[in-house]
Image: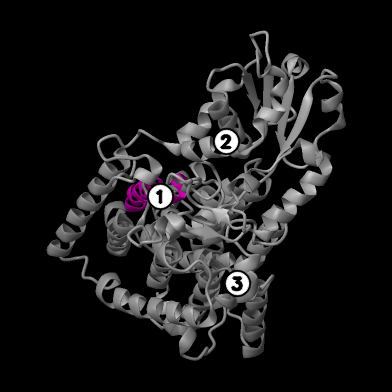
Amino acid sequence: MSSHYRSDIDAIKGLAIIAVIFYHIGMLPMGFLGVESFLVVNGFLIIPPLVYQLQTGEFSPLRWLSKRIFRLWPIVLAASTVCLFVGYQMMIPDDYENLAESVVASNLFANNILAAITTANYWDVVNEYKPLMQMWYIGVIVQFYLLYPVILVILKKSFRRQSVKRRFWLAAVSLIGVISLGMYLLYPDTFSNKFYYVQYRVWEFSLGGVAGMTVSRLRISGHTIAYVGYALLCVLFLIGFKSLSQVDTLTIVGMETAPGGDMIKITLTIAVALLTSMLLQTDVKTGRLLPLLGKISLSLFIWHQVILSFVRYGWIGSFNPLQIAIYLLFTLFISLLSHKYIERIKVQRLSSRLIISTLFILSTGCAFAIYRNAGVVRDVPELGITRENPYANHNTEYIDQIYALQQPFTSSGPHVLIVGNSFARDFACIISEYDVDNNLEMSYSPYVDNIDPSTLADADYLFIFGPKDAIPAKLFSKLKPSCKIYGIGTKSFGKNFGIYYARRNTPGYFSQTIPSNPTVDSINAKWRQQWGAENFIDIMEAAKLSNGRVRIFTPDHKVISFDCRHLTPDGCKFCSTRLSLDKIFTSHSNE
C-alpha cells in the first residue's frame, strides 16, 4: 500500500463539500450531488486496504469496525450534544422532540433510516431547520463499514481456492457494485429509499474500490484530462444555479429545488460518481485551498448544517451576501477547531474511549428522555403546552385524527366528504371546531381515486384540496345533483415558527405578522378562478389582517400554525370563526 499523499483526493472532497454547503444555502440545487463524490472517495480509500487484510488473513472484524466507529463518534456526539443544548434554548416542543429523536438515531448511526421512515424526502423544506439532517450520510458510511466486510468474507469462504488471487477480489468488488447498481436502477422502490438506504449506495463505494484497486495500472496521465474532469464536475454541481435574491423568493431547500424528475437525478448521480472515479485515476496538483477544505471536509459537513439550521431557525430567514460571508467564515473557523481537537483525538487511549462512551450514554439518554416528554422543557401557553401535561395539545395527532373518518356515512346526514392531503385534514378540523354539536357527519379520503362509491353518492357536501382541473370529471358525475362542491386553497405562514418563537421574551412577540406569500396568493387566485369565488375556501384570507399581512397568533395569543403549514387546534377554532361556514351550511343550520 502506497503512503504517497495525494492532494488531488482532498481537492475532490473540497469541491464536493463546497457544493453541499451551497446546496443547503439554497444556491446550488444540484449541490447535493457532492455526497456522491464523498461515497466514491470513501470506497477508494477503504476497500483496497480491506481487501488486503482479507487476502493476507489480517482482518479482524472487531478491530476494523471499532477503529472506524471511534473515529466518527467524537464529532457525531459533539454535534449531538451542541444541538441538544442550543435546541433547549430555541426550539418549540415539536421541533425539539424531532431533534431529540434525530440525536438518538445519529448516535446509533441510523439517521438515514430515521429520515427514510419519517420525512421520507431529502428535499422537504423542513430539512432546512433540522440541525442533524446531514447525519444520514454518516449512517450510510457506518452501515457500509459493517455490511461490506461481511459480503466479502462470505465470498472468500465460497471461493476459497480463488480468494488468494488479486483478480478474484477485483471481480468480487465489481460484482457487488453491479448488483447494487442494478437494484438502484431497476428495483421498484421510491427514490427517497434509494437515496437513504445503504444497499442502493454500495455501487458507489464499489466504484471507488475498483478505482483504488486498479489505480496503479490504469492511471490516467495528462493534466488536461484531469482538469476537464474537474470542470465537468463543477458544471454538474452548478446546474440550476440561483442567486441569493432567487433563494429568498424561489428556492426552498425541500420544495424540489433540484430541477427535473427522479430519472434526471439518477442520471446525474451516476455521472458524478463516474467522473469522481475517473479523477481518482489521476494525480495532479490542485493548489492549496481545495485540498485544505478536503482535509477538514468531515467537520465542514457536520457543522455547516448545525450552524445554518439554527441561524435560520432563530435569527435570519433570508440571507444577504455579508451574512453569507460571515456564516462561511464562522463555519470554517469552527470546522478547523473541530478537525484539530475533535477529529484528531487519540481514540486508541482508554481515557478517550471512556470519555466518548460516557458522552454517548449521556447525550443519548437525555435525548431519549426529551423525546419521551414530547420535547417539552418549559410551558408554552401559546401552544397550549405545559411541562406537567406535555401531550395536552399534540398538533400532529390532532390533525391526523381525521384519518379515523375513512369510513362510509352511517347517519341520515347532512354528509360532508373531505378529500385530499394534510391540508384537507386541516379543513376537516376547522369543520369539527365549527360543528361542536356534531350535526354534520364527516367522511375523509386521502385520494380522489379510492373514494368509496356509496360514500361519494351519499355526500351532501364535497370539499377537495387542490385545483379543479386536476379532478377527474367522472368524479363529479357520481355526485347527487344537490351536492355542494368546494375547493380548498393552500396556505403558508412562513418557513418555520422558530424564528418567531425566538423572540418570545420581546415586547412585540404576540404582535408579529408576516407579509403574504405571493406564490401562495397566486396559486389560490388560480384555484379560486377554477372553483368559482363562492365555492372556494381560502384559509389564508381568514388569517389576514386588514393591511394584507398574515397573523402568526390569534387575538387571544395562541399560535395559528405550529409548523407554518398546518393549523393548531386554536388555529382551527380561529379560522372556523373567520370563514363563512354558516353560509355554506345554512340549509342545515336548524336541523
The secondary structure type at the circle numbered 1 is helix
Circle 2 sits on which residue? 577
Is 424 situated above or below 30? above
Taking 253 as reference, is 228 left or right? right
Q: Please tell me which of labels 3 and 2 falls first in the chain.
A: 3
Q: Residue 525's mark? A: none
Q: Give the distance between the C-alpha atoms of the residues marked 1 and 2, in whole angstroms.
A: 28 Å
Q: Please tell me which of labels 1 and 2 falls first in the chain.
A: 1
Instruction: Say which residue appears at 86% left-offset and 27% top-offset.
Output: 474
| Closer to us: 180 or 333 | 333
Q: Main secondary structure of the magenta part?
A: helix
Q: Nearer the viewer, mark 1 or mark 2?
A: 2
Which residues lie in the magenta part? Answer: 94-114
Asked if one can make out residue 130 in the rendered structure from this viewpoint, the answer is no
Classify 10 Å Cα crowding around label 1: few (below 14), some (14-19), many (20 and above): many
Q: Residue furthest left?
A: 351
The secondary structure type at the circle numbered 2 is helix
Asked if one can make out residue 373 in the rendered structure from this viewpoint, the answer is yes
Please say whether residue 113 is one of the residues in the magenta stretch.
yes
